[in-house]
Amino acid sequence: MIKKIFTLLITFILLTVLFSCKNNKKSDSNTNTTTTALTDFPESVCNYEFNELNSENQVVPEATKQFVETKLASMTLEEKAGQMVQAERRSITPEEVKQYNVGSVLSGGGSYPESNTPRGWLDMYNEYQSAALESSSGIPIIYGVDAVHGHNNVYGATVFPHNIGLGAANDPTLMYKIGEATALEVKITGLDWNFSPAVSVAQDIRWGRIYESFGECPGLQASLTYEYVRGLQQHNISATAKHFIGDGGTKWNPDNYRDSSWALKNYDAFKLDQGDTEISMDELRRIHLQGYIEAINAGVDTVMVSYSSLNGKKMHGHELVQSLLKDELGFNGFVISDYDGIKQLPGDYNTQVITSINAGVDMLMEPNSWKDAITAIIDGYNKNKITMERINDAVGRILMIKHKRGLFESPIKTFDDTDFNSEEHKEIAREAVRKSLVLLKNQDNILPLQKSTDVLLLGPGADNTAIQSGGWTIEWQGTHDPNRVLGTSIYEGLNEVVSENGGHVYRNISDASKADVAIVVIAEVPYAEGIGDNGNLTLYSATSHAGNLLALSQAKQTGLPTIVILLSGRPMLINSYLNNWDAFIAAWLPGSEGGKGISDVIFGDYDFTGKLPVTWPKYTTQFGETVNKTNYVEEDYLFPYGFGLKYDD
């Protein structure tokens, strides 16, 4: 027995040495971080001890405290109530910002000025800000936007991979660079506040917001949140940890129904998003809390509340906002509601406002009902349903962040677009694409390809920067129009390489006989939030592109070796197709530099390093199963959490 164990040990050591010597491809490996790679120890990270809470970055300087106290003492109730609301730019004029002392304006997904350019945004911002400075309180606004993968509302911005791809990369230093680059591009347009990062720990791939999550294991949030927040706030752009708390754990509800035209586009819309997380407090803390601890450790300015419920109670009225987030974790920034989120609380509108504020929400994102919200706050105080202590706490937190970010010192911005979509930012995005790609099959080492290869390129995602960027790009639900998303498509990236080396990229099936290999780029269509809930996840389901199956069929008929690239926000059911593919790459939603980043790896300039941030199921019965299960068996799934090949594996 001892001899057998000794033999196995020697064999393991020899194989390890052999593997380390085989791989001589370039690597994007990060040498500047001491964070342990999650995928080396998936079980230990997903059953980890909480990182220690460090409130050092939550300490408020004495000068700021004194400023806030002095300002509060001079404000009327009406001025304070105005500071506690946020209006959508399409529903408020600069004059109304002045008249009502409004604290914040936002641009929701797809909300942009007539000139969707950096200069157009800056001019709009300064117009609102100038009006705020003329209000009776003279307090500047803080302007928010969902720059969730770059400054994605703005035409021409650098669009980074969505979070699920960054979870596959699991590189904290890269996250800092992305946060910093995003902050610089947001700053150019004048804005002050980014509703990012989502620290949701997605537990079901049917969720339409899964691509906003780094993945299913809380260790990913622990690994990546801190540096991203630091990168954003390094340039005085306030970050937002969202959505507090447990939004990634909602349960599938086949009986849920939304009576609206945009929801009815998908039969499964909102069957999971904004639902109920049924969970014990111990499990809530173990799975869903760590991202908030890391954000607070990084000094995050704001936290956004979730639409979802916790054990049947809506989070916008939940006592955990105060007791857990503010009291226990010591969060000193301000809490904002989600878009119209308080309207899901029971009672009439005034009751909803009072309930949410008393639960600990400091600013109400009431995009179109902001005037009613101001009235309800004032009425709540006059009827002794909201105390002045609670109002002062909320307004004091808001003023503190505005002071911290220099809004009182430099409210009006000057224009300098030097860093907008700069070569440096595009290179960061390209690096992020390379690191996010996960190689799931590479039969007979068909990859990497020779740069002189003649390629037959098929599929709906082959030449479309909009599809490869997904939702939250230019529009809330994304766009299908590649002319609206500046970047490099997969076709453009591949063609640049092979054309310089004597090869060709053919797009027409009639040219199949000229090609050495077929590359098929299948895709999900862009979607966001509950519109993307999908209980099927086949390649022909509601969120799948209608051209997927035709492209796969055409490739099969050619008899060419076939490489399949999937552009998606999550795993899709591919079990019945995989045997027909010689190689398979999960590219997630790579963004504007997807074409170049993918080409870097396919042709072998860099190796694959990405690992699955979510479990890839074989069957629909495995939806909702994650590595957090105590009886997780890797062999049960098509590809387990943490799986990812390298060349020569």
Image (spheres, rainbow, N blue to C red):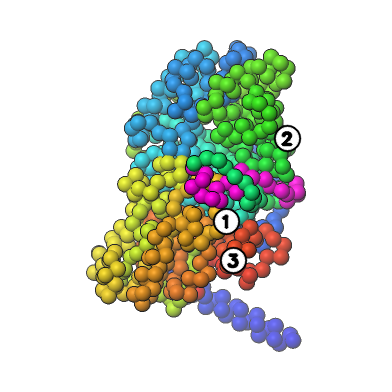
Split into 4 quadrants, where in the image is the N terminus? Answer: bottom right
Q: Amino acid at mark 2?
A: Glu
Q: Is residue 484 above or below residue 491?
A: above
With respect to residue 397, does 490 lie above or below?
A: below
Provide the major secondary structure of the magenta segment. loop
Residue 611 appears in the figure: no
Report how many numbered discs are placed on residues in the image.
3
Q: Residue at x 45, y 28 (%)?
A: 89
- Locate residue 223, reporting x and y percent: 59, 52
Q: Mark 2: few, some, or many residues within 10 Å (few <14, many ≥20)?
A: some
Examine the structure image and report whether residue 273 is included in the region drawn in magenta: yes
Q: CA–CA distance between discs 2 and 3?
A: 38 Å
Residue at image location 48% in from the left, 35% down from the top: 108
**Do the residues bearing badges 3 and 1 touch, measured as CB atoms within 8 Å?**
no
Earlier in the chain: of badge 3 and badge 1, it is: 1
Residue 101 covered by magenta stretch = no
Q: Which residue is mark 1?
A: 535
- Element type at mark 2: loop
Q: Position of residue 358 (x, y in %)?
A: 70, 27
Please state which of the two labelled residues, at mark 2 or mark 3, is closer to the viewer: 3
Q: Amino acid at mark 1?
A: Gly
Q: Nearer the viewer, residue 141 or 84?
A: 84
Q: Mark 2 or 1 closer to N-term?
A: 2
Q: Is residue 338 above or below residue 495?
A: above
Question: Badge 2 is on which residue?
Answer: 319
Q: Is residue 533 left or right of residue 113?
A: right
